[in-house]
Image (cartoon, rainbow, N blue to C red):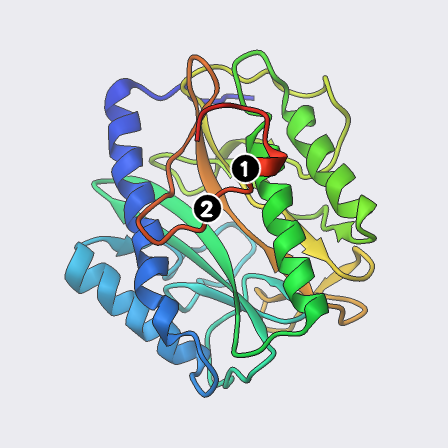
């Protein structure tokens, strides 16, 4: 597996791309409310990226082997949609949950992050799912340091989710990122500690657990992109892009509006 170790120049440019991706989420937050369509959210994000940031929306026309080109600039995954939901005419209503997944390209480098939003008044069950998924992501991030293994990340995420009665989607995972949208390594959100690749300073990858309130089984819709839970249970996801530093980790996709880490759960001193 060819995992690229990023140079200081790469890392600096990744910091910029990561911050810009997070700032798109800051920008769009006030617009995520009952009555808005996912297409409106996409259009606003597109305009902000292109006109304000002078960045490129990475998903637009993204076409991995075996897929049709992705038709929009962000992914909007609502309720039982797990990931890769295509923005359209769907009107968000109070009680919905939605993941907005943003990837920008700036100066040739990708920044990739996503957040969950609760539209209007969410149910206790929906809020809990979003909160536990957020904790899963951060517990995974907290494992990152040189000498740790990718299996350590997956293990803590799986353990925390399953302890709450939830399940982890296994078909999709985090990924290396840099000048390419998706690079090695694959970052599984389940697994055994002490297994898989050893982390080294200069690696950059995403941690983005998808957690289902029901069973982990999923299916793809006819649009060729949208993934949903088979049992139609709610699904949540959070995502950060993370750098392995000499002493631990640095989260690259942070900005003024980023939610605070759940410090009470984390062991590492640096945040």
Residue drawn at x 26%, y 54% is: 56
Residue 119 vs residue 208, the one in the foreground: 119
Decide: is 140 above or below 201: below
Decide: is 218 above or below 65: below
Give me the C-alpha separation between circle 2 and circle 1.
8 Å
Residue receiving disc 1: 263
Which label is found at residue 54? Answer: none
Decide: is 204 above or below 100: above
Residue drawn at x 21%, y 61% is: 50
Residue receiving disc 2: 260
154 horizontally vs 36: left or right: right
Residue 253 at x, y percent in the picture: 38, 42
Residue 172 at x, y percent in the picture: 64, 47
Residue 36 vs residue 221, the one in the foreground: 36
| Whether label 2 touches label 1, CB < 8 Å | yes
16 horizontally vs 266: left or right: left
95 horizontally vs 242: left or right: right
Q: Give the structural element (helix, strand or loop) at label 2.
A: loop
């Amino acid at each position: 597996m060819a995992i690229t170790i990023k140079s200081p120049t790469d890392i600096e440019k990744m910091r910029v791309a990561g911050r810009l991706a997070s700032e798109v989420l800051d920008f769009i937050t006030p617009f995520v409310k009952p009555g808005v369509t996912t297409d409106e959210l996409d259009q606003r994000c597109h305009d902000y990226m292109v006109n304000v940031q002078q960045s490129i929306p990475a998903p637009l026309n993204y076409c991995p082997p075996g897929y049709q080109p992705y038709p929009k600039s962000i992914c909007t995954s609502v309720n039982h949609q797990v990931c890769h939901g295509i923005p359209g005419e769907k009107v968000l209503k109070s009680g919905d949950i939605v993941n907005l997944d943003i990837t920008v390209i700036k100066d040739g480098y990708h920044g990739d992050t996503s957040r969950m939003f609760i539209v209007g008044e969410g149910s206790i069950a929906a809020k809990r799912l979003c909160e536990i998924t957020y904790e899963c992501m951060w517990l995974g991030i907290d494992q990152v340091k040189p000498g740790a293994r990718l299996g350590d990340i997956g293990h803590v995420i799986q353990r925390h989710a399953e302890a709450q009665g939830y399940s982890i989607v296994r078909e999709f995972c985090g990924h290396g990122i840099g000048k390419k949208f998706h690079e090695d390594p694959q970052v599984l959100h389940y697994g055994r500690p002490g297994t898989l690749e050893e982390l080294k300073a200069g690696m950059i990858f995403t941690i983005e657990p998808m957690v289902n309130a029901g069973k982990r089984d999923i299916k793809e819709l006819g649009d060729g992109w949208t993934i949903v839970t088979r049992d139609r249970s709610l699904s949540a996801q959070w995502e950060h892009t993370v750098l392995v530093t000499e002493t631990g980790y640095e989260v690259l996709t942070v900005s003024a509006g980023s939610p605070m880490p759940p410090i009470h759960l984390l062991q590492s001193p640096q945040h």
